[in-house]
Amino acid sequence: MHEHLESLAPVAPENEAAAVTAAKLFTEYLRACRHEQFAMSLLPPGRFLMPGALANSPALTFAPLDLPTGGTPPAGSLWAMMRRRYESYKDIVVRPFFRDHFARLDRQIVLVDALAAFNAGPEALRDLEGALEGILDCFNTGRRTLLSMMFRPRIDRILFAATKAGHLHHLSHDRLEAILRRMVERAASRAEFAGATTDVVALAAVRATREASAQHHGETLPSIIGTPMKGEVAGKETLDGESEVATFPGDLPASPDALFSEGTFKGSGSAHPGEADYRFLRFRPPRLDATQGEPALPHIRLDRALQFLIGDKLQ
């Protein structure tokens, strides 16, 4: 990506082939940043990773350029072409999204994959913290009034939810909540100052594991049992996606602040995978027994999330 970027002259005549190549490399770069080794969260423009019907359209055929400070793009230049397409992206994707979706919301749940950031390391955790703060800047938060309900709804309740709680033993759920609370502290304070109510929960819409105790060198460890996704690695073994395993996912720290200091723990993004301090496996949904009628999917704290978000509307 960087080599190709250095080869592009922003003031050169616009070139469709160069734009297509740059956009392709830029997309590959964003995908690499999202890989579990790095687990970056701040990866705009988002539709490059989920193009949908816009795949290969001019609105997604642009990329960053190494531009001089100040100045304006010459007419007919590659610089002008990229700027024009970026503005089209905002007109076609960004503004309609805010107008048609965010503008009508009065309750919001923000799903946070904190475990992926733990796997990747401190850099990913700090990047996630910044992403959450940026997300709140997009919301029109505040206490609802009659006028706001009629003309411009405000988000008066925001729930930050740490997902995949079932990938941890329940003894760590409160610690996961405390860590997420620390990550959204600044953003939540601003929302509350505007009149919104916020809360934090560790949940799993579908619980993928069950709990057990395992003996290791005479010590009883709180463990979980489930079927990891195909390709997950435990120790030196690559798992097949069919077999159940019992694993001790490790203990989250009691003090959230310790995680945000420099060099506090090793992740897969900065160390050999075997040296990472955390390795939370990804699990498949549980196998359900349908012999006794329609099975119910197990969950963790989903009821608490619903109570916070819509409980008052059902009273």
Image: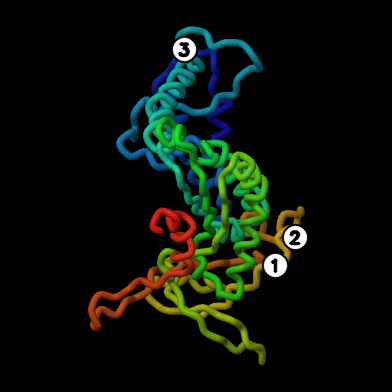
Decide if residue 270 is on the left or right side of residue 227: right
- In which quadrant is the C terminus drawn? bottom left
Secondary structure state at the residue bearing disc 2:
helix
Give the residue at x 42% y 64%: 205
Q: Position of residue 59 (x, y in %)?
A: 39, 27
Of the residues shown, which amino acid type is indicated by label 3? Pro
The image position of residue 256, as x and y in percent, is: 70, 60
Q: Are marks 2 and 3 in contact (CB under 8 Å)?
A: no
Q: Which residue position is annotated with label 2?
A: 258
Is residue 83 something that shows in the picture? yes
Q: Earlier in the sequence, mark 3 or mark 1?
A: 3
Q: Residue 47: tell me if it is visible.
A: no
Front residue of 108 and 229: 108
Q: CA distance from mark 2 to mark 3?
A: 52 Å
The circle on residue 253 is: 1
Do callouts 1 and 2 mark residues in contact (Cβ within 8 Å)? Answer: yes
Q: Which amino acid, mark 1?
A: Pro
